[in-house]
Image (spheres, coloured by chain):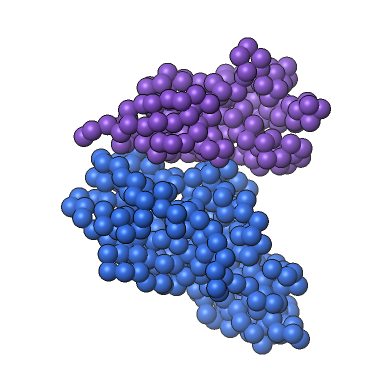
Amino acid sequence: MAKHHVSALINGNPVEYLCDAQQTLLEVLRDELNLTGTKEGCATGDCGACSVTIDGRLVCSCLTLGAEIDGKAVQTIEGMATGTELHPLQTKFLELAALQCGICTPGMLVAAKALLERNPDPTEDEVRYWLAGNLCRCTGYNKIIEAVLAAAGEMRKG
Amino acid sequence: MRYAKPKSVDEAVALLAAEKGLARVLAGGTDLLVQMRSRRALPDLMVDCKAIADMTSIAAEDGGIRFGAATACMALVENAQFSAACPGVTDAIKLIGSIQVKGRASVGGNVCNASPAADSVPALIAAGATARIASPRGSRDVAVETITTGPGKTCLARDELLVSFLVPRKQRNCGDAYLRFTPRTEMDIAVVSAGVNLKLDATGICREARVSLGAVAERALLVAEAGAALVGSKVDNAALERLGAAASAACRPIDDKRGTREFRIKVAGVLARRAAQIALDRTGKEN
């Protein structure tokens, strides 16, 4: 079966790739494009480690086909920092020790960024509900929630 | 497996009709891709319907609000016109999976996956929603309660495509709500659920009521007796008690690790009463 030719914007850069019909976006990102920041946890949409945005909408890349992305704009964790300058969420995750093993971290950051783009001043409850689809087995979540709230405060200062 | 992305309903149903092997319709893929991974579904052809405008748009029309069957749940939840027009259905959609899953999952997929515990289904049934189903022979509109026939089974023929839903416009003094019971608040599947839609007259007497229960039978139920228990009342405590009893009486649930038969039957009555109370509270609000 012929491969699908896909043209997309990934982290703002025009990218073209070939993929099989059944290849997921997660597999394309990691195995074809070498963007290994996006992690595979469960591969069934339960853990959120593979979170990316497609045209601004937060999704699980494990539940998306690579072939679906033609003409779309994808943002991954690799697009979060500007050069060597970290995004405020990344800075606060480091400062407040919001990660341990790090497997959930790219998904947490991408999901948190999608929240703050919609709601720059979320309550703790709103952060907890928004991140309910991102599982972390290390931190107990409190430090993650604190880091997101601190980053939101920082970003509101501009 | 082959992947196709038709741009029209006609093109999509022609692909489904022509496929000799197994064709599956792809909307959000949050059930289908999981089934493929576990090899429970091995389609020969995947028909991605998200490039079809009728299947991904939300628009008011005569009689109500129509939304495409492949529209992502988050797109519905974030659409102010939709959430104002369809509060009960919005309650249900908000409960499906995580934000990420809702970013992909569609109501059409939720209905066609045909889980007895699907959240959107009792809410759509209570709201009196209809579905537009297309095939090479034309299109037909059916009540949502007639689509699911059992776990994983629908009334759709292999060349039929669920295109859109119409939720009837709320009249004055109407209200609806959906509630479910789950052990966790998020990322869980309904153990029992209830959708209630009621209409009062100017004196506060209930004139119409639709009650639907989820996860207490092989498919979501429209419980006529439960709706009838409210009609003619002011939705007072006595009427709510009758509603709860009728809801519980309609249950024929399974008994499993997520909830015993006895528990589901009892909780169905409790949730029906609580959903009716919320629906009643919402009747005062203009839509």
Which corner quadrant of the image does residue A131 belong to? top right
Chain B shade: blue
Which chain appears purple?
A: A
In this rendering, the answer to whether B271 lies above or below B232 is: above
Residue farthest along the left direction in this orientation: B20
Residue shown at 30% from the left, 64% from the top: B135
Residue B219 shows in the view: yes
Would residue B142 appear left or right of A152 to someone viewing this image?
left
Would residue B24 appear left or right of B101 to someone viewing this image?
left
Q: Quadrant of the C terminus of chain B?
A: bottom right
In this rendering, the answer to whether B115 lies above or below A22 is: below
Would residue B93 appear left or right of B32 to someone viewing this image?
right
Residue A77 in percent (x, y) is at 55, 24
In this rendering, the answer to whether B4 lies above or below B263 is: above
Residue B126 in percent (x, y) is at 55, 71
Residue shown at 71% from the left, 29% from the top: A148
